[in-house]
C-alpha cells in the first residue's frame, strides 16, 4: 500500500489485504496527521490488494476497467474459512493463496469485495496530479502503474511479476521487457508491491543484468 498525501484528500494506492490491514493504515494516517482518504486506487484486482476496500468509507474506488467484472465475480463468491478449505480441496494449487487469505481474515462480518466505482481504460489523472496508466501483462489484465510526478515516484503494483502461483508455468518469470519500458528519467524511485524500493539507477542495473 501507499498513501499520497494532498490537501484535497489523500490518494490511497491499494486497499490492504483485509479490513484489519486497512484499519491499521488508517490509524497510521491519523497519527501522522495526513488528510483523510478521498480516492482508493487499485493497481490490480488480486485479493491482497483489494480485500481491505470495505474498510475505506466515503472514498471513490478507481480501477482499470478490466478488473471491474473480475471483482464482481469475486464479490459473488461465499467467502468464509469453510469456503476457502473447500476450494483448496477441489484445487490444491490454490493452497498457498487461500491459506494466506484465511490467515489475513479473522472476521468475515460485513466483509465484501468491492469493484471500482470509477473505471478508466488507458490513462487517468486524478485532481491531485497522480496519474494512472494501464499496462496489463501476464500477472493481471488490469495491472496499473501509479505515477506521482511531484515526488518522482512510480508505484508499479505487481505489473511485471509472473502469473499467480496457481496459474504459473515452470518457465514463467518476471517481465523484464515491461520493466525496462517503464523506466523514465522523470521518475527517480520505483516501488513494486512486494519488494524494496529501488532508484532509477538500481532499476536499470536490474533489467540489464
Image (spheres, grey):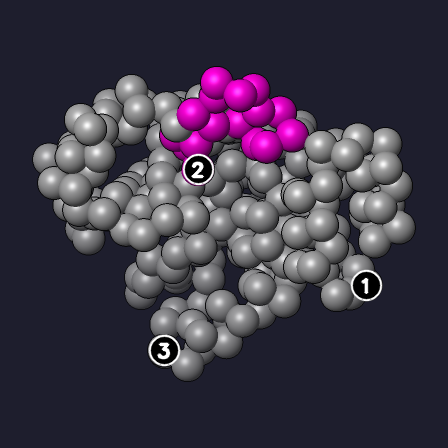
- Residue 6 as seen in the image, left or right of residue 56: left
Q: Nearer the viewer, residue 199 or 79?
A: 199
* Label 1 residue SS: loop
Q: Nearer the viewer, residue 97 or 120?
A: 97
The numbered mark, 3 or 2, whose residue comes first in the sequence reads 3
Residue for badge 3: 32
Which circle's residue, 1 or 2, is located before the other in the chain? 1
| Image location (x, y in percent) of residue 124 | 37, 34
Residue on which the image places disc 2: 158
* Position of residue 86 in the picture relative to residue 25 (left or right): right
* Viewport quadrant of the C terminus: top left
CB contact under 8 Å: marks 1 and 3: no
Q: Which residue is mark 1?
A: 109
Residue 146: tell me if it is visible.
yes
> Residue 139 in the image: x percent, y percent?
50, 28
Residue 57 seen in the figure: no
Residue 25 is covered by the magenta coloring? no
Residue drawn where x is 24% and y is 23% of the image = 181
Distance from label 1 to label 2 (Cα)? 29 Å
Tell me where the magenta segment starts and ends, as one range: 158-173
Quarter of image, res 158:
top left
Query: In what element is the residue under mark 2?
Result: loop
Q: Earlier in the sequence, mark 1 or mark 3?
A: 3
Amino acid at each position: 500500500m501507499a498513501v499520497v498525501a494532498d490537501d484535497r484528500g489523500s490518494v490511497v494506492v491499494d486497499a490492504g489485504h483485509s479490513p484489519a490491514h486497512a484499519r491499521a493504515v488508517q490509524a497510521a494516517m491519523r497519527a501522522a496527521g495526513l488528510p483523510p482518504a478521498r480516492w482508493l486506487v487499485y493497481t490490480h484486482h488480486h485479493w491482497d490488494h483489494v480485500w481491505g476496500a470495505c474498510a475505506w468509507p466515503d472514498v471513490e474506488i478507481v480501477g482499470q476497467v478490466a478488473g471491474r467484472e473480475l471483482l464482481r465475480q469475486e464479490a459473488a463468491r461465499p467467502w468464509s474459512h469453510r469456503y476457502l478449505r473447500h476450494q483448496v480441496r477441489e484445487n490444491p494449487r490454490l493452497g498457498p493463496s487461500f491459506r494466506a487469505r484465511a490467515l489475513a481474515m479473522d472476521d468475515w462480518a460485513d466483509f465484501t469485495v468491492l469493484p471500482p466505482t470509477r473505471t478508466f481504460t488507458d490513462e487517468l489523472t486524478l485532481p491531485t496530479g497522480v496519474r494512472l496508466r494501464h499496462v496489463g501483462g501476464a500477472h493481471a489484465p488490469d495491472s496499473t502503474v501509479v505515477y506521482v510526478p511531484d515526488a518522482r515516484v512510480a508505484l508499479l503494483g505487481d505489473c511485471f511479476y509472473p502469473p499467480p502461483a496457481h496459474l504459473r508455468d515452470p518457465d514463467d518469470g518476471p517481465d523484464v521487457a515491461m520493466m525496462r519500458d517503464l523506466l523514465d528519467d522523470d521518475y527517480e524511485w520505483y516501488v513494486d508491491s512486494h519488494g524494496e524500493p529501488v532508484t532509477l539507477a538500481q532499476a536499470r542495473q536490474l533489467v540489464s543484468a
